[in-house]
Amino acid sequence: MTRSTDRILTTHVGSLIRPPDLVAFLRAIDARESYDQAAYEACLAASVTEIVRRQAALGIDVVSDGEFGKSISWSRYVLQRLSGFEQRALPPAEQGFAIATFGRDRREFSDFYAQYDQSQGFTNMRGWVLRGPVRYTGQAAIRRDIDDLRRAVAGAAVTAAFMPAVAPASVAPDRTDEHYRSEEEALFAIAEALGEEYRTIADAGFILQVDDAFLATMYDVIVPPGTLADYRRWAALRVEALNIALKGIPEERTRYHVCWGSWNGPHVSDVEVKHLIDLILQVRVGGYSLEMANPRHEHEWRVWEDVRLPPGKVLLPGVISHSTNVVEHPELVAERIVRLAKLVGRENLIASTDCGFAQGPFVQRVHPSIMWAKLRALVDGARLATRVLWGQ
């Protein structure tokens, strides 16, 4: 895992707002309309180069491709790269959010969500069915994404680059299974298949980030009627599956991102991180990326007063929120960094964002200009924190 002994490095969670020219192609792909494949590939490559250039110019140390090569969402993109899945037609009213996100928060604030969902732009999300054996078939797509990112970083002044990939727990958890004998059998088959994408990213020389929003958000669905113990058993099995997918990949080339679903809603039913942190730290990766800036979870930085970051690991706390248009002051960002650095060690911390600024090609949590202003505040705050922590 990239680390520094003389300053606070910066990164983010991966997904950035897509440029309009690229979105036009992605809408055609989503609608299954005809489009110019060569023009799309050229636009995608140019868009990745530009987004990396802007990150580097801003001072982001560990950059991504913005997840521009994913044409559905941060998680469901993989359904186009795995055999065994098919999507069945649903009425338009049922095509939005996955049923797996329909928990207590949505029940208690149903009026809010009825209005909110209309603005989110999610399409092509539901109706996924598992009909046959799961195998990885996305070799061409991941190679294209790797080639685009490699070209983009070749001339950029960055410390490292990372690519996100979905965790087994977050692969269409609302799927209907018509093939496997049990949920566990399907889960481990998915993990084995995902391992190929993971290894391809790491072998290409990039840092693999595994995204796992559903690990935390399923608590809201399971409890009640289930208990915290029921939820922890559910989560522990998925941690086990993820470790299978990560087998053979050097830990220093990996990091694990957990959030509470990213949407800017109430989140009053979120599981507290103290009930989940031991399971998160069982994932065999080099770094842990957690939401720690939004008003529902910022207070949970104190978990590190009682929990020890394992030796050799890195914490990537969110010190910038993706879910509000208010731009954080750099001094607040520095304050968040410094208090955590004093608990886990300044060399063991990379300043990051809570989550991605775009959970799919048609979803953005803030305006693009605000996204860049927030990333600027992240960089400026890290510089202020460096002065405090190293006396520079």
Image (cartoon, grey):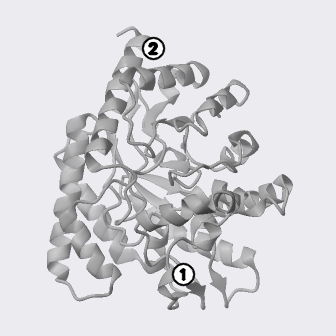
Element type where label 1 sits in the image? helix
Can residue 189 be seen in the rendering of this structure? yes
**Does residue 320 lie above or below 363 as drawn?**
above
Residue placed at 25% from the left, 56% from the top? 150
Residue placed at 68% from the left, 60% from the top? 218
Outermost top residue: 391
Q: Quadrant of residue 12?
A: top left
**Does residue 135 lie above or below 21 as drawn?**
below
Element type where label 2 sits in the image? helix
Residue placed at 25% from the left, 68% from the top? 23
| In front: label 1 or label 2 | 1
Residue placed at 59% from the left, 61% from the top? 111
**Does residue 114 lie above or below 105 as drawn?**
below
Question: Which numbered marker is on residue 296?
Answer: none
Q: In which quarter of the image is residue 174?
A: bottom right
- Toward the viewer: 137 or 109? 109
Q: In which quarter of the image is the C terminus?
A: top left
Can residue 246 be seen in the rendering of this structure? no
Q: Position of residue 250 (x, y in %)?
A: 52, 50
Crowd around label 2: few <14 · some 14–19 · many ≥20 (10 Å) = many
Provide the residue designation for mark 2. 389
Q: Position of residue 204 (x, y in %)?
A: 36, 58
- Amino acid identity at mark 1: Glu
- Amino acid identity at mark 2: Leu
Question: Which numbered marker is on residue 94?
Answer: 1
Q: Position of residue 165 (x, y in %)?
A: 47, 61
